[in-house]
Amino acid sequence: MSGFSKEIVRFETLAADSRNALVGGPFGSNLVSNDYVDSGVPVIRGQNMGHGRWVDGNFAFVSDEKAESLRANWARPGDIVFTQRGTLGQVAIVPAGPWDRYVVSQSQMKATIDPKKADPLFIYYFFSNPVEQQYILANAIQTGVPHSNLTQLRAHPISVPPLEAQREIAAVLGGLDDKIEQNQCTALTLEQLSSSIFRAWFVDFEPIKAKVAGATSFPSMPQAVFDSLPDRFVDSDIGPVPASWDVKAIGDVVTVKGGATPSTKNMEYWEGGSHWWATPKDMSRLRHPVLLSTERRITEAGVRCISSGLLPARSVLMSSRAPVGYLAIAGVPTAINQGFIAMICDGPLPSTYVLQWANASMDAIHARASGTTFPEISKKNFRPLPVVVPPPNVMAAFQDVVDPLFESMVAAV
């Protein structure tokens, strides 16, 4: 924006000249969970923010009659919604559909922008940038739960170039976001396809069932591999499995590791660190199961304090507590804290298979977790979990199909 002349104004001066152009959510008991119904007018809550530019996600609803009583708290397409308590700094635009009106909850505020003064998409990007996010957090009201309010939103200083420049900036950033959203959609499709293939081949055993039923081929499986499949099942500890296929403990076919946190008081372990160091918090932010970076890094000295050291890329990471079950393949060499079980895939099972196995086995993993404060699964309880180990030619065929999907997903993230 350095090429444009800019004016710094109070945010309220950009609001439309209409009643309730800047408004917070309903007061107290005017909107409670008992008001929610299965369909009607959607309510914008915290979980409907943070999905990119648009208000989105799973909505709660109120009846038309209830919504009418909360008319002052409506948000319309093109309005900007801000979170005032909870995850401060969240901002999103009300989309053009599928509803023509929303109710903002007690934790949100909304602004209707004067289109002659500002572009709503530009406003979204302005409030989303790290400088403004930090300003919001630094100026939060610290009494009780940190929060903001309508007075602060009205007074928020905003740097506005001419309207045409705003639109140009928003168009460029919007185009980038469109590409990101397209990539995210592609990555999700690839992830779902990989999961479907794993489940068909190694959970439901559909190719073997098809062969038992007289089929001479199976979609997505090479003919030579299908021809080599057994045509019967045998009993095992986990139920019927294809004859000649093994069932082993996961700890016998991968190397299971845990992590640790070097002393945070010793700056030798942290200052100038060049190695990625993961916590479950890093996993919670992932939209797809690949870890490419972490919030913190540690030094070589820090790595030496962790018995598992620096895990190789393609290790499968699973959070073992708070909560149990975040999953990802490490796309880079990574050290981990004590909230993980890591699986180094140095045996017959590749990381893409182990990732899908862990995802499909999550109920059994949770069943082995214990703890009084929060559930946690230990390496001791994790290692005996059973895993089907198919013959090498079947595994190689699975990799030939799924590994390129995974690499394409990584490229799209």
Image (tube, rainbow, N blue to C red):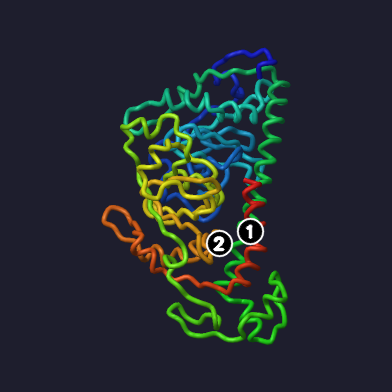
Q: Within the image, what quadrant is residue 206 found in?
A: bottom right
Residue 104 x %, y %: 51, 39
Q: Is residue 187 left or right of residue 324?
A: right
- SS class, disc 1: helix
- Position of residue 195 relative to residue 2, above or below, is below
In which quadrant is the N terminus drawn?
A: top right
Q: Residues within 10 Å of mark 1 (few under 14, many from 20)?
A: some
Name the residue nearer the viewer: 61 or 250: 250
Q: Which mark is residue 265?
A: none
Q: Earlier in the sequence, mark 2 or mark 1?
A: 2
Residue corresponding to mark 1:
403
Q: Residue at x 68, y 36 (%)?
A: 176
Task: Find out whether the residues at labels 2 and 1 contact each other: C-beta distance under 8 Å.
Answer: yes
Q: Which mark is residue 350?
A: 2
- Total labels: the figure holds 2
Name the residue nearer the viewer: 403 or 137: 403
Asked if residue 342 shows in the view, the reply is yes
Q: Residues within 10 Å of mark 2 (few under 14, many from 20)?
A: many
Residue 289 x %, y %: 54, 52
Q: Residue at x 45, y 77 (%)?
A: 238
Q: Residue at x 58, y 76 (%)?
A: 205
Three-letter code, disc 2: Pro
Q: Residue at x 42, y 45 (%)?
A: 279
Looking at the image, which residue sits at the far left? Answer: 372
Asked if residue 64 shows in the view, the reply is no
Residue 282 x %, y %: 46, 44
Residue 19 x %, y %: 56, 27
- SS class, disc 2: loop
Name the residue nearer the viewer: 52 or 82: 52
Kindly report the distance in space between the C-alpha atoms of the residues bearing marks 2 and 1: 9 Å
In which quadrant is the C terminus drawn?
A: top right
